[in-house]
Amino acid sequence: MCRLYLATEQGTAAGGRPVTGWLPAVRLIPATGLPPTAVLKQRDQGFGRSTHSPPNPPDKALVLCVDEKSQIQALDRTQPSLPMHYGLPETHTHDYRRYGTTTLFAALDLATGEVIGKLKRRHRSAEFISFLRHVDASVPTDLDIHMILDNYGTHKTPKVKNWLMRHPRFHCHFTPTYSSWLNLVERFFAALTEQQLRRGTHRSVPALEKAIRQYL
């Protein structure tokens, strides 16, 4: 599993890097009563009235922020990238070779930052159900699972709904339309891109998936 660390104080992140206008949702809950859905911008005043998420999940429950990062590309630059030197910026070519794509399904524990992840080559409802089975096997059986999701069609197909009906401990809470960025797992996807993928060289899909698993 991977543990996601967020800013612990307004305006700073781990290592002292400045963060502008962002606060962890878990720090906002006691003061504002807003639902534990995502990382919020302070200027989003009407968020608590519009988001469909569990305001007070039961004691024996786990809140997971769930989504998929699709079309992750295995890329190799046509020339090696050069690192930053004194007086010179980092460089890389504008063109690249593409070797294929993969999709990462992820469920981020809102309370601890731990991530349950699974890689698939496609992102249909069949792959999503397979990921739900993986989550079901990873979470202790005595806990209910409250999932925060966006309104992507894959999350609402008849097959997915039938699977959820057969597994009553799963409860779905959807973010407002066009507001998937409110889901905290999107911050994890951004960290994955910035820290592991953006400057990486992956000459095959298996090499890309190995790099993602190492990060997880």
Image (tube, helix red, strand yellow):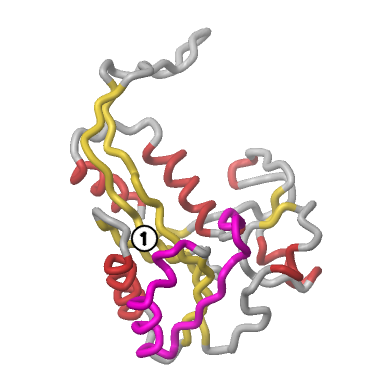
Give x and y (percent) for residue 31. Answer: 80, 69
Give x and y (percent) for residue 139. Answer: 38, 80
Q: Is residue 142 left or right of residue 124?
A: right
Residue drawn at the location 63% of the way across and 64% of the way down: 176
The question of residue 178 being in magenta is answered with: yes
Give the residue type at disc 1: Phe
Q: Residue furthest top?
A: 87
* Vertical position of residue 120 compared to residue 125: above or below: above
Give x and y (percent) for residue 65. Answer: 51, 66
Residue drawn at the location 20% of the way across and 33% of the way down: 203
Quadrant in the picture for residue 29: bottom right
Residue drawn at the location 43% of the way across and 42% of the way down: 193
Q: Residue furthest front?
A: 158
Number of disc labels: 1
Residue under pointer 1: 105
Give x and y (percent) for residue 39. Answer: 64, 57
